[in-house]
Amino acid sequence: MSSTKILTKMSCNGLSTLLSFMTPVLFVRIHAEFQLNTPPQQPFWFTPAQFTGHIIINRASSHIDFFYLHVPSDNKLNVDLEWLNGPRESNTMEVDIGYIQQMELRSSSPSRTIGNVRHPEKIKKREEIAWISEMSERDALDVIEKEMYSFKQVPYYSLAEGVDRAIAENKLLHSVVLWGALDDQSC
């Protein structure tokens, strides 16, 4: 019987987007690289652009009420693929970039039982929680992106908006054209 190892490198940033004393919601962005083959087979690396999602934690019973991570599919390219075709990485590395329509992890129930029986009536729905503060997921993602990528601290505009601003402010226009997104692992 053969077994396959999957090696993973990962980095993660997170931010609490909704906060109640007993039930924080954490919005996360994770970058992971999966090495699907190991020697003696030729390595193959599968690198999704990013995983984003949220986790709802129940501090009262020390468990996770809800967990959801997905690879965003709003960009045309969202996965990087790399593999070796020979013994030396320096001259035999092949690289491609592509698109996956859906890749996600989602919890179907809380992470922990109370005794031997689940008590769904003790799990509050998101609407039933009294929140102390709240931040939209888009705002949370912006904060996380600015922490991960210093270039995100500068505002970026579409070409039309950039031309209008350059004319209005009597400044030069700097344009960057990319094949993929600069702020994810697939580029």
Image (cartoon, grey):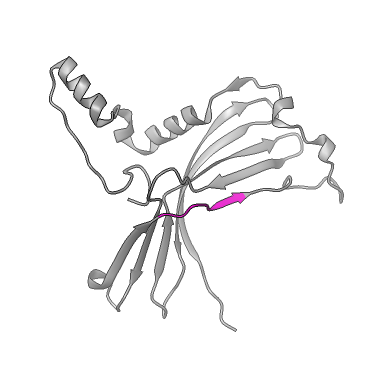
Residue furthest toward the top? 168
- Is 102 magenta? The answer is yes
Q: Is residue 85 above or below residue 77?
A: below
Quadrant housing residue 170: top left
Image position, residue 120 (x, y; %): 82, 40
Q: Report the front residue among 119 and 62.
A: 119
Q: Name the side, left or right, on which 71 lies relative to 149.
A: right
Residue occupying image coordinates x 22% and y 42%: 177
Quadrant housing residue 142: top left
Image position, residue 107 (x, y; %): 67, 48
Quadrant housing residue 16: top right
Q: Name the side, left or right, on which 133 lies relative to 185.
A: right
The magenta stretch spans which residues?
99-105
Q: Is residue 135 above or below residue 145?
A: above
Q: Name the side, left or right, on which 54 lies relative to 92.
A: right
Image position, residue 181 (x, y; %): 33, 44
Q: Report the front residue among 14 and 49.
A: 49
Residue occupying image coordinates x 46% and y 33%: 141
User: How many dots with numbers?
Assistant: 0
Q: Name the side, left or right, on which 152 lies relative to 132.
A: left
Q: Report the front residue among 178 and 136.
A: 178
- Is 115 magenta? The answer is no
Q: Report the front residue among 39 and 101.
A: 101
Most common secondary structure along the magenta stretch: loop
